[in-house]
Image: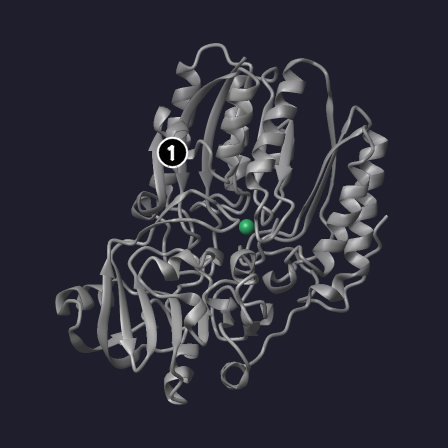
Amino acid sequence: MRLFLAMFSHETNTFSNVPTDRAQFEARDLRYGGEIVETYRGTGTCLGGMIAAAERLGAALVPSVAAAASPAGRVTRDIYEHVKQRMLADLERAGRLDGVLLDLHGAMVPDGVDDGEGDIIAAVRRAVGPEVPIAVTLDFHSNLGEQMIGGADLLHGYKTYPHVDMAERGTEATERLAQVIGRRIRPTAAWRKPPLLPPLGNQGTARGPMRRLYDLAGEMEKDPKVLSVSVFAGFPLADIPDAGLGIYVVTDDDQPLAERLAGRLARVAWEHRGEFIHSALPVKEAVARALAADGRPIVLADMADNTGGGAAGDGTEILRELLRVGARSAVVACLWDRAAVQQCVKAGVGGRIALEIGGKVDDRHGAPLSVTGTVRTLSDGRFIHRGPMMNGLPGRLGPTAVLDVDDVKVILITYRWQTLDPEMIRFVGLDPLKEKILVVKSTIHYRAAFEPIAKEIIEVDAPGLSSSNLARFDFRRIRRPIFPLDPDLVYEPE
Ligand SMILES: [Zn+2]
């Protein structure tokens, strides 16, 4: 059994003014051929799961390209075409294939294309013809679209947020693909897109409306006729017609059953739509509460400045308040400011400097902050993920500096990456357990590794492009009416 393998992953926040160009992919991941297998084998990622399952099944992998970049603005045409054409050229060269495995995101918006994954899947389908089955893993935040569904035999969405089941989904997609190749199953899908645009803040699967939907999906999957159920919460900050919640049910050759279950999930999602509305504490209240709280560490979640949702990662409002009230024993993890890192490098460890940090990308993450501090540590930004997400995968933050401003330690990074692992604090020589306050720039993912160590978590409503307050965004192209932007919308699920 010969299986083609490729990864192309980006979550595009169309409100961001940071173009996702080739350099952004090179900073995160852009690799080819056998190196993909060497890098991802044994990691908690979709590729890790696909590689493990393929090896267990005795399948030969034909690895092509793996490309991923931190979420930001639209993917530029040149890098998009480069990755797509590389995939198509490798497919052409691959000779006889039994199946195709794609690790995609589902919310990539390249310049001039609304549905990047739909476009990729359609192109792969044209290349391999109608007979070769295609199985795809998609992020929980996929904005499910018709082109993806029509082109692939199987879509497998992550069932968790924080995404701790990526390897499991990669394994599942590979095993199901092998069953299709062996003609043991006939995937038959139904899908629904109720008019729902859930903000990120209450999409977590530990509790709330997505837990309810996945509990129901879990019950449905107990039926041996049901191959898989994916409920995509969607990525609301891609201003495209497909943005929002999507439901996808695959049965073994039973269309009426797939339709019935998809309809039921859509109805339940709609009935509980109010639970998706999220509220967090204003910055001043949140900082005051953290200072007054017992024990340590207290996590202040800077949910709206999550680079993992395409925000700048250089928001200053919580830091400004910490300094204003004279907070001590605090860490801000991590602030994206390449210029500030360079100034710290120039000053050297122990150097004392005055500089402006953050607030430089746009006017939606607070203004730049003038501070004077001491450079505490400098590093090359290389670390290994040690938490439940992407466990074992190397991470790169680029040149990294810790600037100590009166015992508020700001971790300044060169490459954007969401603070989803306490290792991103530890590797620069800070101990997250000994600090009073940890400001973590992440919406939900931080919970997987920070909940077990945090004395308390406080969700903060600071400004930023991953805000759960969707009224702050000037949507122009999403489907309307849609909840919660049009709260009185009348919708009758079948
Ligand atoms: Zn996601």
Task: Work out which residue is located at the far top of the displayed protein and give it.
Answer: 96
Whether residue 48 is situated above or below residue 204 in the rendered picture: above
Closest to the observer, 248 or 328:
328
Q: x and y percent of residue 92 in the render? A: 42, 16
Residue 415 screen position, x and y as percent: 32, 55
Of all residues, the one furthest to the bottom in this rendering is 325
Q: Is residue 127 left or right of residue 68?
A: right
* Residue 84 rendering spot, x and y as whole percentages: 42, 32
Figure quadrant of residue 211: bottom right
Residue at x-position 67% and y-position 19%: 179
Residue beneath label 1, please? Answer: 39
Return the x and y of residue 480 as percentages of the image width and height. 67, 59
The residue lying at 64 percent from left, 26 percent from top is 153
Q: Is residue 278 above or below residue 79?
A: below
Q: Is residue 65 left or right of residue 442?
A: left
Q: Is residue 172 visible?
A: yes
Asked if residue 176 lies left or right of residue 493, the reply is: left
Q: Residue 181 lies in what quarter of the image?
A: top right
Secondary structure state at the residue bearing disc 1: helix
